[in-house]
Amino acid sequence: MTKFFENIQKRLKEIGWASWQTFIALSVFSVIVAGMTHSPVQTIIANFGWLFLLIGVWWFTYDSTVKKRLTFNGLFTGPWIVGAIVCLWLFGSWNGAPTPASFISWPPVSALIWSVPRFIKTDPDKKTPTYTVPTPAARQDIVLMLLSNLVISCWFQLHFLLQDWLVAYPSIRSDDFGRSAFVVALNPQSQPDIKGIDLLDAAEQSLKTRLEGKPWGDVERWLSPEQLNQEIPKLAADAHTKMPLLSESNLWDLRGRVLPDTQYTLELQAIWQGPSAKTEGYYITKACQITQGRKAGPPADFEVSSSAGSTTRSRAIGTVKCEAPSQPLPIPPQTPT
Amino acid sequence: MSSFDVLPLRAVLFQLLFLVTAIALESMVLRNRLGIGRKISIQFAATTNLLSTVIGWMLFFIVEPLLSPELRSQLISYIFFDLTTNPPLLIGLAFISFIATFLVKLEGITWLELLLGMKKDVETEARATAKFQGRRAQRAAFATVPNRPLAVLWANAISFSAITLLIGIRLLFDQTFGTF
């Protein structure tokens, strides 16, 4: 056991104090201390932890053997490792994945770190590093490195813009991206989240509160073509209030019609008016059977008078029964309804 | 946290293809028309093309949040489904970007020369010497002195034509073989 500690001691002496290991150790130490303290002090210590980590890793990557390992095709990738730490420090979060800001800033920050050695030369007399203006060739390299990394960060930005769109318009995801010149869907089988289905479900709820249990005469009046034209927009407005607050919600239009030659099959249509792979857009339908149900009339004493009277007296009321929503259907060039 | 389900990989690949094409063609045009070395011509072409790409993306990201829902919907259709719902707008934008990239490239070469501390360019030197040789010599000098804006315009026109051709080939493939 003592030999083990002696070994460590020996190792430490070989490494010396001025080394990258010192800074990594300081960083670990800072993290431990930060874990034991509270808010204002904790932030300061945590920042020191990042700083030590940054210096340690930077030192480590410029170690000659490590530098050789990290060089591919003449390009030294160390600055991108250091850059990742800088961006995580500045924009990342402790307990989550890197934030979009840290992704986007990573390439240009790394390019700047890459160019730092080109601004430094060793002073011939004092053997200390001093500032120098890079040579023209180095200046050209810096410009190209910075610009190409900016292009990469634009690609990251594009990626996050696409994600924002997919969040705002979830129904896009249900379509096929095969024709796109920009994007690839890695997991096409994932469950599409079509908000039109939610709209139809909300409309069904509103329809039931309007018609279920209402006298049949009122129900028939509600379903008459003139009245329906006025009622459907109200139903749609009602259903829209139950939708989540998304940009996409306004792009779903709700329409309804009584199918011809039926004793009231109300077909509700959610029509997608947003971006779609199908040129004319698509729609989802939900058929609702509205039938006459019977509710027993006021009981007891009336029942006595006659058996024929009981049928007239037990009131006819509306019942609503809806099917599951259909698959998305392409809209034919002439729009239905 | 955002997912990595949908990636703009095709956009990246197309952009790389277009950049390589443009840099190769433009450096050739610049070398022939300006009588400069191979290395410098590639430096010019690479720097100016990367610069105009970055500026283009920046403008896109600045303008995108300002779009009306209608225009954004068209943009999304174009990006996700390759549907050109508004061809006049697309052609107009292509025209504007041609002019804009030309100006950026012309200015970019001047900035790059300043940054690299290159010697005064051949054109002004030739003009200056022509000044002392009387009017006839000056007129003759115009014919032989390389005209930089014209060279950049040619370079830009050729790279744009090549990229248009590539887009056309992609559309053709798309129509004959379905998905690309």
Image (cartoon, rainbow, N blue to C red):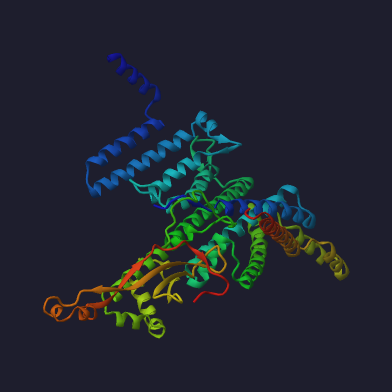
Front residue (pair B37, A37): A37
* Residue beneath the point at 73% across and 61% down: B161
Front residue (pair A79, A129): A79
Q: Residue furthest left?
A: A301
Look at the image and tell me whether residue B76 can be seen.
yes
Going by the image, does A101 lie left or right of A335?
Answer: left
Total numbered labels placed on residues in the image? 0
Q: Quadrant of residue A36?
A: top left
* Residue beneath the point at 49% across and 56% down: A157
Q: Image height check: is A148 above or below B68?
A: above
* Residue beneath the point at 42% across and 43% down: A85
Front residue (pair A117, A277): A277
Query: Measured from the top left, where is residue A10 in percent x and y?
Result: 35, 19
Look at the image and tell me whether residue B59 can be seen.
no
Query: Measured from the top left, where is residue B106 in percent x and y?
Result: 68, 62
Query: Measured from the top left, where is residue B143 in percent x and y?
Result: 84, 65
Query: Measured from the top left, where is residue B118 in percent x and y?
Result: 68, 53
Q: Residue furthest right?
A: B136
Front residue (pair A40, A168): A168
Going by the image, does A185 lie left or right of A310?
Answer: right
Q: Quadrant of residue B139?
A: bottom right
